[in-house]
Image: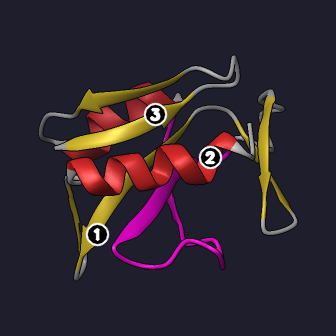
Amino acid sequence: MKGVVITTADEVSVRDFAAPLNKSLGAVVGGYIELVHPQGLQPPYCMIVNEEGKLQGLQPNFRLDHDLIVGTAVFVGVSGEDFCSLSVVQENTVWRMMSWVI
């Protein structure tokens, strides 16, 4: 599964994630994963962050919908209750959306 990764160093890249997704996504965000649906980010997009990132004092990354996102964030697709890859068009949409945020 492909997703767009945004680090606290303002690095943006497309990565492949292998099953089990909770482990491969967790390794990138540095802990347990939390699925986030910011108001401005409608399905088929969702964002994965570290569930305890704010409690752990992770470095700020960007603001989205009046919320401070900390640590590395991963944008993936969602289909029903499952994560799915972003298409190339969707990846480009995330890149454009985030270009004014970071």
Q: Is residue 39 left or right of residue 32?
A: right
Alpha carbon separation for disc pair 2 and 3: 11 Å
Residue 82: x percent and y percent? Answer: 21, 69
Highlighted magenta segment, given as a residue range: 31-52
Look at label 1 and name its amino acid: Val
Residue 25: x percent and y percent? Answer: 35, 38
Q: Mark 1: give few (<14), some (14-19) or many (20+) Cα within 10 Å.
A: some
Taking the image as drawn, is residue 33 in sight? no
Q: Mark 2: give few (<14), some (14-19) or many (20+) Cα within 10 Å.
A: some
Q: Which mark is residue 78?
A: 1
Alpha carbon separation for disc pair 1 and 2: 18 Å
Look at label 3 and name its amino acid: Val
Q: Secondary structure at mark 1?
A: strand
For disc 3, the marked residue is 5
Look at label 2 and name its amino acid: Met
For disc 2, the marked residue is 98
Work out whether 29 lies above or below 77: above
Residue 2: x percent and y percent? Answer: 22, 41
Q: Residue at x 28, y 54 (%)?
A: 89
Q: Secondary structure at mark 3?
A: strand
Quadrant housing residue 37: bottom right
